[in-house]
Amino acid sequence: MTSTVSSPSRTIRIGSRKSQLALVQTHWVQEQLQKHYPNRTFEVHTMSTQGDNILDVALSKIGDKGLFTKELELGMLHNQVDFAVHSLKDLPTNLPEGLVLGCVTERENPADALVVHEKHKDKQLDTLPPGTIVGTSSLRRLAQLRHHYPHLEFKDIRGNLNTRLAKLDAGEYDALILAVAGLQRLGMAERIHQAIPSDVSLHAVGQGALGIECRAEDAEVLELLKALEHKPTAQRCYAERAFLRELEGGCQVPIGVQTVIEGETLTLTGMVASLDGQRLIKDTTSGAATQAEELGIELANKLKDQGAQAILNEIFAEIQR
Ligand SMILES: NCc1[nH]cc(CCC(=O)O)c1CC(=O)O
């Protein structure tokens, strides 16, 4: 066992995926930590994950949880890196033995964004004509948009943000749904045509926040990471993650959430939808923000009582085909 006893000379190795978005996020974390701890050394180690390598299969069909995280987790368990920076929404709700979510950073706008081809620049989601081809690889976005806009058509899309935008501009799609946060972090906020209102699309669990995963035993790293923790974001995301965990959904199921903290009170809204958008179950619960996980579990059970489990079972069977 390698010693992790505090020593000012210990270099902290940060694991990251190689995508442009991952690197922007990781370098931001590195920079913030460097500001807080000017005498320490933080270096970035990049790794490819399965999700980066398999680009020709719909994400929902690959089905494996941890598609974007597994290699980084092995890196931590094998002591090649000390912590990993993830988009929190890509981090499964159950972590491998020995690893923990050490820190949740302040969330950016968690909403989904409509991005349109030039020819639709005068349109909004409400006015896109029948047959408009919307690119998304997310079953959550697909189900909710089908529910509200049954006249639109949906086509799967994979690849990093630049690849997707290039496919849109080349006319393969008329519009895309992407995360506001990703576009903002990559300096492409001008491509956000419309932030989609939450009554149309509830966002993914953890969307817009970064989650930093580290070894449970590494007290030194856990202490360093406290500098970047944003408590309200963490409470919201703990509620969202407990909701998803209780429904046993990964990032590839049509489950959406929204959370608000007012004073000491956390309000969590969640929904589960069928893939055709015909059935959509949505409810809300409120309580003490300090009881975030309990609220998530409570809301999941409320939705199960209203038929969410049957919808999810159908989807799991569908995906496995
Ligand atoms: N699954 C891909 C992914 N993971 C995180 C983001 C965006 C940033 C975020 O939500 O924090 C994206 C792209 C997207 O959904 O458009």
Image: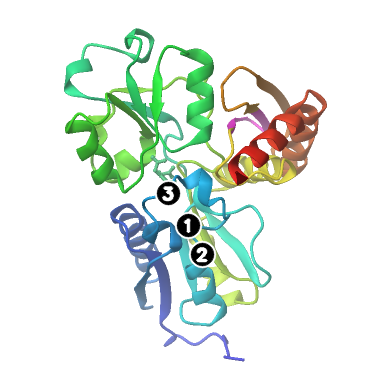
Amino acid identity at mark 3: Val
Left or right relative to 67: residue 234:
right
292 vs 176, left or right, is right
Q: Nearer the viewer, residue 236 or 144?
A: 144
Residue 314 position in % (x across, y down): 69, 34
Residue occupying the far front of the picture: 321
Mark 2–mark 1 CB contact (< 8 Å) = yes
- Residue 290 seen from this side: no
Whether residue 10 is visible to the viewer of this picture, yes or no, is: yes
Ligand 1, seen in the image, is in the quarter at: top left
Q: Position of residue 270 (x, y in %)?
A: 65, 29
Quadrant in the picture for the N terminus:
bottom right
Tag 3 and tag 2, C-beta contact below 8 Å = no
**Alpha-carbon neighbours of circle 2 within 10 Å: few (<14), some, or many (≥20)?**
many
State the separation of the CA atoms marked 3 and 1.
Answer: 35 Å
Residue at (36%, 53%) from the top-left corner? 55
Q: Nearer the viewer, residue 310 or 194?
A: 310
How packed is label 3: few (under 14 Cα within 10 Å), some, or many (20 or more)? Answer: few
Name the residue: 34% across, 57% down.
Answer: 28
Q: Is residue 283 left or right of residue 111?
A: right
Chain part drawn in magenta: 255-270
Counting the numbered discs, the total is 3
Secondary structure of the residue carrying tag 3 is loop
How far is mark 3 from mark 2, CA to CA? 35 Å
Picture disc at residue 228 = 1
Height in image: 157 above or below 144? below
Q: Which residue is mark 2?
A: 225
Which residue is denoted by mark 3 in the rendering?
A: 57
